[in-house]
């Protein structure tokens, strides 16, 4: 089984990211190819980047960075769950990405975006894809974009996808397995 880290990016009170992250985690478990772990940036609570040495050197001083590095290093693949904030993805995710360099490399990433409105977080995805590319993380073409998120969350704070969203998730996970297999060979070829 491949180690899949699902990164929930929102941190503010009242956030919906963990609800969506729980849904995609359960969907990924049903795929049968992944050992799934959710990394909730709201719980991890990384401070603004405070390492004195550039992450390219991998000389981490702080315990929170060493723990974050270990979690990301052990991953074979990622799914980023992101809202759209001001036409981009949350600063908490940008900060978490910038803590590390080598640990992200040669691994595939599925993207799950959402918004309360009609845009479904696609502008956040466009920004995130550019930043992931600079870290040598391959974001899949197949993604899950969720418009009108609040109408899909019930009174028990459970996300219920419509058929289009559910099918998109299955398609993305199928491709994530393929890319994980292929990139594992590239990552091990040092």
Image (cartoon, rainbow, N blue to C red):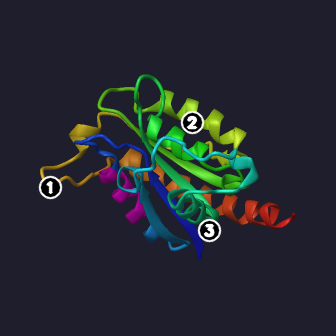
Q: Position of residue 45 (x, y in %)?
A: 40, 51
- Position of 173 compared to 9: left or right? right
- From the image, tell me which residue sits under label 1: 156
- The C terminus lies in quadrant: bottom right
Q: Are marks 2 and 3 in contact (CB under 8 Å)?
A: no
- Name the residue: 81% across, 61% down: 186
- Magenta-tinted stretch: 18-27
Nearest to viewer (mark 1 / mark 3): 3
Q: Are marks 1 and 3 in contact (CB under 8 Å)?
A: no
Give the mark, 2 or 3, whose residue is nearer the N terminus. 3
Quadrant in which residue 21 is drawn: bottom left
- Name the residue: 22% across, 42% down: 14
- Residue furthest to the top: 86
Relative to 168, residue 179 above or below: below
- Name the residue: 62% across, 68% down: 74
- From the image, tell me which residue sits under label 2: 128
Nearest to viewer (mark 2 / mark 3): 3
- From the image, tell me which residue sits under label 3: 74
- Position of 10 compared to 155: left or right? right
Disc 2 to disc 3, how far (Cα)? 21 Å
- The N terminus lies in quadrant: bottom right
Q: Position of residue 152 (x, y in %)?
A: 25, 44
- Position of 57 compared to 68: left or right? right
Disc 2 to disc 1, how far (Cα)? 30 Å
- Name the residue: 55% across, 44% down: 50
Quadrant in which residue 66 is drawn: bottom right
Q: Secondary structure at mark 1?
A: loop
Few, some or many residues within 10 Å of mark 2 (<14, 14–19, 20+): many
- Position of 2 compared to 54: left or right? left
Q: Confirm whether residue 15 shows in the render.
A: yes
Counting labels gives 3
């Amino acid at each position: 089984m491949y180690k899949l880290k699902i990164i929930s990016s929102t941190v503010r009170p009242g956030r919906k990211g963990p609800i969506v992250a729980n849904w995609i985690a359960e969907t990924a478990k049903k795929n049968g190819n992944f050992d799934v772990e959710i990394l909730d940036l709201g719980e991890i609570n990384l401070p603004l980047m405070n390492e004195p040495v550039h992450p390219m050197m991998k000389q981490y001083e702080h315990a929170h960075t060493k723990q974050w590095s270990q979690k990301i290093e052990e991953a074979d693949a990622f799914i980023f769950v992101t809202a759209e904030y001001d036409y981009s993805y949350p600063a908490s995710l940008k900060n978490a990405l910038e803590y590390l360099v080598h640990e992200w490399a040669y691994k595939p990433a599925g993207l799950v975006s959402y918004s309360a409105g009609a845009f479904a977080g696609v502008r956040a995805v466009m920004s995130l894809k550019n930043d992931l590319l600079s870290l040598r993380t391959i974001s899949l073409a197949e993604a899950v974009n969720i418009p009108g998120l609040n109408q899909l969350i019930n009174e028990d704070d459970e996300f219920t996808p419509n058929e289009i969203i559910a099918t998109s998730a299955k398609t993305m996970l199928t491709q994530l397995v393929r890319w994980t297999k292929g990139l594992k060979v590239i990552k091990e070829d040092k």
